[in-house]
Image (cartoon, rainbow, N blue to C red):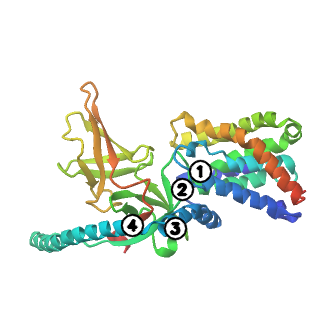
Amino acid sequence: MVLAVASLAIMFLDHRQHHLEAIRDGLTVVLAPLQYIADLPAIAVDWSAETLASRNSIEAENRALKAEHLQLKLRLQKLDALMAENARLRELLQSSTVVGERVLIGELLAVDMDPFKRLVILNKGEQDGVYEGQPLLDAHGVMGQLVRVAPFTSVGMLISDPSHAIPIQVNRTGLRAIALGTGAPDQLDIPHLPTNVDLEVGDLLITSGLGGRFPPGYPVARITSVQRDPSQPYAVVTAEATARLERSREVLLVWREEHK
Amino acid sequence: MTLFRHQHGWVIAASFAVALLLTMLPLPDWAAPLRPEWVVLVLIYWCMALPSRVGVGTGWILGLLLDVARGAILGQHALALSLVAFLAVHFHQRIRIYPLWQQGFSILMLVALAQMLVLWIKGVVGQLPGTWTYWLPSLTSSLFWPWVFLLLRDVRRRFRVA
């Protein structure tokens, strides 16, 4: 009975007041070794896939990577010039320049959490200087943000989590909206857009930077369907995340300016 | 904790650690909703076998760990597991004498009760999982019960945990 009341009390404290971070951190430290052990099979599979790969496949991969590297370098050269030009133009306009962001590569632990949420565990924690609310990216776009930071691990929420929302902008038109997670892997909903909205299948959605959590200009998702029913007030718009939410093992942690 | 005051407390603790590990072990997407509630199963076993040592308090602490492992609100599994532990201890003499398949039904009810409590709390907080697959763990838990029971009984006899 006492414990039941205690449970209710800590649920209230945790949900409404966020007073129990210390207790949660302590318990997370207790669980961290178990989480690392649960990750071992995935590490073993990765390791054996690397060690047992044939020479041919490694050579092919190497060739592909070299080609990609060359292409990226080419684009980078252009980007340098564009960045210089951009900075010059911004100076002319007397607006602040965009500062480069600091990044850190974290690795996801292959640990399952609640199957009805989209949460992941990272092997970076307080000791690496990560902070709550920090954006997570992969090579293809925005993955999510950190929701809890413990000393050695941290919990990230993917943008497909049903309780996650991310402010976005349509790259083609500049239209601003909010993309909500659905709980289904990779799928996002964009509610409250009028039926005559200028959207096409395949439109790229990027972060708008509003809300201050995510840095602006990173790809988030592509529109996969726009259903316009004239009898309904809003169009039903769904999009697919560009980041490989369920497949990426390495993620980039990005520092916003005020946290550097 | 009374868990460690007597002999071989580490066996009980280790079984709970393994249960937590199985809860966190990654499964393919189709199998993830089928994952039995390992921690609840192991907790029910020890509550039935050694009600004097494992009880509501153990369930409560395990529940807190489960909350952290699942990224849930601190306390929701703690409440559910302490209730399950209370019922298991209360009815341990009755459940003990049931044949295994009939025990499975009791387990079904207990795990479903735990899930129901968690669902209520999720509903109050506003994070309802909207599909019927939410209830599958109760079913798989009761199907796995005979094996968990036999395995843990052998472990208990081998290490003479009493």
Residue labelled with disc 1? A12
Residue labelled with disc 4? A56
Question: Which chain's residue wears label 2?
Answer: A
Q: Residues within 10 Å of mark 4 (few under 14, many from 20)?
A: few
User: At label 4, which amino acid type do we have?
Assistant: Asn
Q: Secondary structure at mark 2?
A: helix
The Cα–Cα distance between marks 1 and 3, rounded to whole angstroms, is 44 Å
From the viewer's perspective, is A233 left or right of B34?
left
Q: Are marks 3 and 2 on the same chain?
A: yes
Quadrant the C terminus of chain A occupies = bottom left
Q: Secondary structure at mark 3?
A: helix
At 60% across and 61% down in the image, what residue appears?
Answer: A38
> What is the count of numbered marks?
4
Q: Secondary structure at mark 1?
A: helix
User: At label 1, which amino acid type do we have?
Assistant: Phe
Q: Are marks 1 and 2 on the same chain?
A: yes
Residue A24 x, y percent position in the rendering: 60, 62
User: Decide: marks 1, 2 in contact (CB < 8 A)?
Assistant: yes
Question: Which chain's residue wears label 1?
Answer: A
Question: Which chain's residue wears label 4?
Answer: A
The Cα–Cα distance between marks 1 and 2, rounded to whole angstroms, is 7 Å
- Which image quadrant for residue A236? top left
Q: Are marks 3 and 4 on the same chain?
A: yes
Vertical placement of residue A9 versus B14, above or below: above
Q: Which mark is residue A17?
A: 2
Q: Which is nearer the N-term, disc 2 or disc 4?
A: 2
At 76% across and 50% down in the image, what residue appears?
Answer: B43
Residue labelled with disc 3? A47
From the viewer's perspective, is A134 left or right of B91?
left
At 38% across and 62% down in the image, what residue appears?
Answer: A135
Most foreground residue, A91 or A41: A41
Residue B149 x, y percent position in the rendering: 80, 46
